[in-house]
Image (cartoon, rainbow, N blue to C red):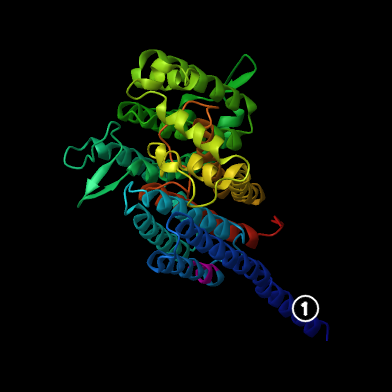
Amino acid sequence: MSEDVAADTAVLKALRRVRRPAPRRNRELLLLLFSIVLSTGAMALVQLGALGELVYGELILSGLLGLLALALHVVLRIKASNADPLVLPIAFLLTGLGIAEIYRISLSGTNPSAGTSQIVYAAVSMVLAGALVWLLSNYRLLFRYTYLFGLAGIVLLLLPFIPFLNGGGNAKVWISIAGVNFQPGEIAKICLAIFFAGYLVRTRESLATTGRRVLGFTFPRARELGPVLVIWLVSLGIIVIQRDLGTGILIFGMFVATLYVATGKTGWMLIGVFLAFGGAFVASRFMTYVGWRFDNWLNAFDQEIYDREGGSYQLVQGIFGLAHGGFFGTGLGQGRPWLTPVSQSDYIIPSLGEELGLVGIFAILSMYLVLVGRGLRIGIAGQDDFGKLLTTALSFTLALQVFIMVGGVTRVLPLTGLTTPFLAAGGSSLLANWIILALILRISDAVRQQPKAVIG
């Protein structure tokens, strides 16, 4: 009898485990439907505000994008039923708002096909994210290829130097294949995140406990820190030659954050901050294009700097756009965001700020805060060191990218050439961010299947 009771208890526990994910997926479905309504509504408001009528072609495309999001939800329900329920709806809503604003700017005659192109990029990105969730049943497979991902990151950063692949531009960051431009550095940062996480898992004990102690800091031996420093320095060297300051800062920040989480040593964070400020100071003195960015930042309203080529005109126009939006904004489709150069990419935040106002920007920043917070909670709850470091690195990368871009367009920081995740125009960035999203979802599913991993 006792054996029968024990068997029945085991069956009930198994059933509870099977049924437990359903509320999460149902919650995700409700939030996703809400996001689809908001993003499609934003597209409709843009058309009514700018054109005075609805154009059903773009609305149908926006609706089809919502169907792809629902398909991704089904993939999660089947293959990753324990995945975090908030990540997908937030990412889709940010993408939808970005598409609506890019489409609004395209109506002014600035790159008329930009809105449709962004919908296509989003569709491709979501399909690839779904395929990654479906095929990558165990994210720890990535750990086996730590060094291969490090090499891949370097190769991707080198691709723009190949003459027949170079896509042009002041910064050598683009490649062109069959007439399609792509920025391999966006994928390189994911490869380097996997490399940093995998390598530091292997050496974290030595990094934290062995080495020579100087001024209160324990510096690890070269044999442990050497390889990861070589990959990092080579990456930054390539980026400096490419004149891509933003990606260099992003990879540096990701490296320092991952090193801090791996070792638990606050000293590494302080050293990283010191090196970042020191490097910025040196770069501003010896690299003309960096020095000009600092001039534009510090003296944006100086008439001479405002009028010169490559001066602060763009920055000041973005600030005026934000001021014009006020507290509640002009309304979608009723502002003039196209007056700011590259308003659909680098300056998508001021564009949205003009039409959605301070309230809208706070709502967008709150979504980023929740998205990054969920990623960091997944990393903290994980019992697998590789998953913990990888999720932290990817989440911190998103957070740092948002901080750098919002700080740049609001004149808190010097402006760099990054894009705002999910919002800004560009297929490379959107694809990379949805891959990051898929990895976070896959890891969160694995974390919730582990015992004692409760993250709400």
Q: Tell me which residue sits at (51%, 32%) in the image.
A: 319
Residue 278 magenta-highlighted = no
- Determine whether 323 is above or below 431 in the image: above
Residue range of the region highlighted in magenta in the rendering: 72-76
Q: Which residue type does callout 1 highlight?
A: Thr
Determine whether the residue tagged by mark 1 lies in a helix, strand or loop: helix
Task: Give residue 341's position: percent from left, percent from top.
Answer: 38, 36
Q: Tell me which residue sits at (47%, 17%) in the image.
A: 299
Residue 235, by quadrant, is top left
- Determine whether 254 is above or below 145 in the image: above
Describe residue 443's horizontal placement relative to residue 239 as left or right. Answer: right
Image quadrant holding the N terminus, namely bottom right
Q: Residues within 10 Å of mark 1 (few under 14, many from 20)?
A: few
Q: Tell me which residue sits at (33%, 38%) in the image.
A: 154
Task: Give residue 126's position: percent from left, percent from top.
Answer: 43, 61
In the rendered image, which residue does mark 1 sit on?
Answer: 9
Task: Give residue 51's position: percent from left, percent from top.
Answer: 42, 58
Q: Residue furthest left?
A: 164
Q: Nearer the viewer, residue 114 or 285?
A: 114
Magenta: main secondary structure equals: helix
